[in-house]
Image (tube, rainbow, N blue to C red):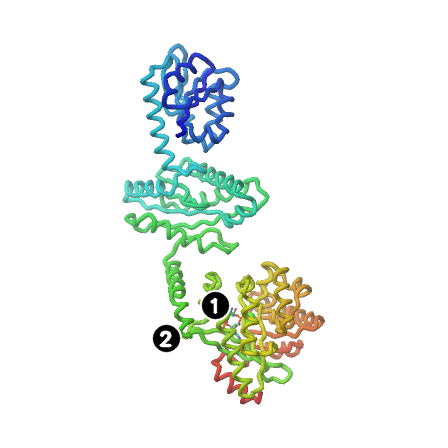
């Protein structure tokens, strides 16, 4: 087994030899003649990791003990290595200054062998305890120690109110991936240092690293101070030298009951922090009960989704699209509805975002495509004319390697001529990876599908996309257009989009049309199709069929 090491830093050869004689049985002795040499030696990780103590002389040439301590003290990774200063009776040494630099202990020269041994054993024990309580990378408390300190802090002050704050770095994983683990570590150490500096003169607080890039701070409930801390951390992190942008996410929980378990407290702050994710506008959130309720609702949906699919609780509704030339329906969009056992209908706005984040949307999309294929097949079998039906393709599916295969597989299985199936891809999906999506769209196109760009105008890259991607129909959503802008401006935008689409030979569908005036305007501007409550709401399959029959289609 490897022996633990003692670093003896002394310019006197005699004292180095005496220390070696006393300690060599139990330890490997590494010698340095001055502070500079000692710092060099400590840079070697293999030596550092096994160094259980440093015996430091103060008066030395080149770099004396004080200068050494000053440098040594700066490095977080040296924090767990005890320094024992060797003092001589005939010299006036400044113990106070040493203690300020975090020196652990002193030993008198000439050495008394037993005392020297005991001091080393004591220091090593303390260092071991310390290393168990501190995060080895950043030197702040680790999770266990933070939890324990929080418990003690709160229990000591039962009559006071506390807050717990969780701070993390946004997209830290991406920084790790793109810039490497070493860079990630460097940033984390900087982050810890920033927190340490900010918290320096607060009393009744504790902080530490919970995991990964998540740090936690527990302090007295003082909104002003908390805001100050959050802002200062953000400001200081911005100064970090790196060629990427650093943002933080902060979740705050005002501890309601001091008897609460610590993990529960931390969970609440984490729930609040989650609120800020993927939202460039918010970077700080205070926990509210409502957040937990949202989470519980989400969890309920997740718990029920597999069963619901199995029991065919998801149903396809059809919303007709009207041709503005003939004023008759010319097809429909299939929209999912969740019909619960008790007959209650849940709208997709409640569950689609959840399914998009947990991947279940891939199964649900497939289920909907199959429903629609089955519907078209039956119509064809019964000898009816069939108007095309469009299905939604979630952006998540565009990253699914089996997407193309499963869609084409369905169409083949049900022997559906692809012209009956229109595919709606939402515009925002294209901002992710335009080149990859372009390829996907090309494939789909070659297989005979008609591609609609859904929610055109809601994203930012719309115009660029038009030149690169092979589309067949543009779908503009009136909801996006009317949000916060004047009617006059909206009209101009719609007119411009329709003109441009015309120039590119792309038909336009306007969606979300609720009023006569909107319909008239769109008609005047040359829009081709309309989908909206003005004509019809999404409806069950049989209603859609009877509508089509009535209209003789
Ligand atoms: P979307 O694809 O943009 O669908 C249009 C939404 O606008 C539908 O909401 C439709 O009911 C609604 N709508 C249509 N006309 C009007 C109108 O005149 N006024 C108003 N206020 N709303 C109108 P819905 O059915 O609640 O669906 C919401 C979103 O959920 C859809 O937006 C789509 O992104 C997603 N979604 C629905 N079904 C599916 C599906 O089967 N698969 C996937 N991946 N997403 C789906
Ligand atoms: Ca759609
Ligand atoms: Ca849409």
Residue 433 versus residue 172 in the image, above or below: below
Helix, strand or loop at label 2? It is loop
Answer with the quarter of the image where residue 416 lies.
Answer: bottom right
Inter-mark Cα distance, 2 to 1: 20 Å
Q: Is residue 212 left or right of residue 107?
A: right
Query: Which quarter of the image is occupied by the N terminus?
Result: top left
Count the marks.
2
| Res 378 label | none
Q: Nearer the viewer, mark 2 or mark 1?
A: 1
Q: Is residue 479 left or right of residue 25?
A: right
Residue on which the image places disc 1: 363
How crowded pointer 2 is (Cα within 10 Å; few <14, some 14-19, many 20+) is rated as: few
Looking at the picture, does residue 400 appear above or below residue 5?
Answer: below
Quarter of the rendering containing residue 199: top left
Which residue reaches farthest top?
90
Location of residue 546 in the rendering, given as x and y in whole percent from the top left corner = 51, 87
Q: Which residue is denoted by mark 2 in the rendering?
A: 341
Of all residues shown, which one is farthest toward the right? 503
Residue 185 location, x and y as percent? 50, 40
Q: Which of 530/34 is in front?
A: 34
Q: Residue at x 69, y 71 (%)?
A: 499
* x and y percentages locating residue 295 in the rendered image: 39, 60
Q: Looking at the picture, how far across and down is residue 52, in whole percent?
A: 39, 27
Pick whichever of labels 2 and 1 is earlier in the sequence.
2
């Amino acid at each position: 087994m490897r022996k633990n090491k003692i670093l003896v830093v002394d310019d006197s050869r005699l004292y180095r030899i005496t220390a070696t004689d006393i300690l060599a049985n139990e330890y490997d002795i590494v010698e340095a003649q001055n502070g500079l040499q000692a710092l060099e030696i400590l840079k070697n990780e293999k030596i550092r990791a096994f160094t259980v103590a440093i015996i430091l002389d103060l008066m030395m040439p080149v770099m004396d003990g004080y200068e050494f301590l000053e440098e040594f003290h700066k490095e977080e990774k040296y924090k767990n290595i005890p320094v024992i200063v060797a003092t001589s009776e005939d010299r006036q040494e400044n113990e106070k200054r040493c203690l300020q630099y975090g020196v652990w202990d002193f030993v008198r020269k000439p050495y008394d062998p037993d005392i020297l041994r005991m001091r080393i054993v004591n220091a090593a024990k303390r260092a071991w305890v310390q290393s168990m309580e501190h995060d080895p990378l950043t030197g702040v408390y680790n999770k266990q120690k933070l939890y324990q300190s929080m418990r003690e802090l709160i229990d000591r002050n039962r009559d006071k109110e506390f807050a717990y704050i969780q701070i993390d770095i946004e997209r830290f994983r991406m920084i790790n991936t793109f810039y490497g683990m070493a860079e990630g570590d460097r940033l984390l150490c900087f982050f810890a240092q920033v927190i340490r500096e900010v918290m320096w003169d607060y009393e009744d607080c504790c902080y530490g690293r919970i995991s990964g890039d998540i740090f936690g701070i527990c302090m007295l409930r003082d909104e002003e101070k908390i805001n100050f801390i959050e802002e200062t951390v953000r400001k200081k992190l911005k100064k970090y030298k790196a060629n990427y942008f650093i943002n933080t996410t902060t979740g705050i929980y005002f501890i309601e009951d001091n008897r609460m378990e610590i993990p529960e407290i931390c969970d609440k702050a984490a729930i609040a922090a989650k609120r800020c994710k993927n939202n460039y506008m918010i970077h700080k959130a205070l926990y509210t009960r409502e957040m937990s309720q949202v989470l519980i609702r989400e969890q309920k949906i997740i718990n029920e989704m597999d069963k619901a699919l199995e029991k065919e609780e998801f149903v396809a509704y059809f919303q007709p699209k009207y041709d503005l030339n003939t004023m008759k329906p010319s097809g429909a969009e299939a929209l999912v509805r969740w019909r619960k056992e008790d007959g209650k209908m849940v709208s997709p706005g409640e569950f689609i975002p959840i399914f998009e984040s947990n991947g279940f949307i891939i199964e649900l999309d497939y289920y909907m495509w199959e429903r629609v294929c089955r519907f078209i097949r039956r119509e064809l079998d019964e000898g009816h004319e069939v108007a095309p039906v469009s299905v939604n393709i979630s952006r998540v599916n565009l990253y699914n390697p089996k997407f193309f295969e499963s869609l084409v597989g369905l169409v083949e299985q049900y022997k559906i001529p692809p012209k009956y199936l229109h595919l709606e891809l939402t515009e925002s999906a294209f901002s992710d990876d335009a080149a990859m999506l372009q390829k996907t769209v090309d494939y789909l196109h070659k297989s005979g599908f008609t591609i609609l760009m859904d929610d055109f105008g809601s994203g930012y890259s719309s115009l660029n996309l038009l030149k690169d991607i092979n589309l067949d129909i543009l779908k503009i959503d009136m909801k996006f257009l009317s949000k916060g802008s004047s009617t006059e401006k909206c009209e101009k935008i719609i007119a411009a989009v329709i003109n441009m689409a015309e120039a590119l030979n792309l038909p336009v569908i306007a969606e979300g049309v609720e009023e006569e005036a909107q319909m008239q305007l769109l008609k005047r501007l040359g829009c081709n199709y309309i989908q909206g409550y003005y004509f019809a709401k999404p409806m069950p399959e049989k209603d859609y069929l009877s509508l089509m029959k009535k209209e003789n289609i």
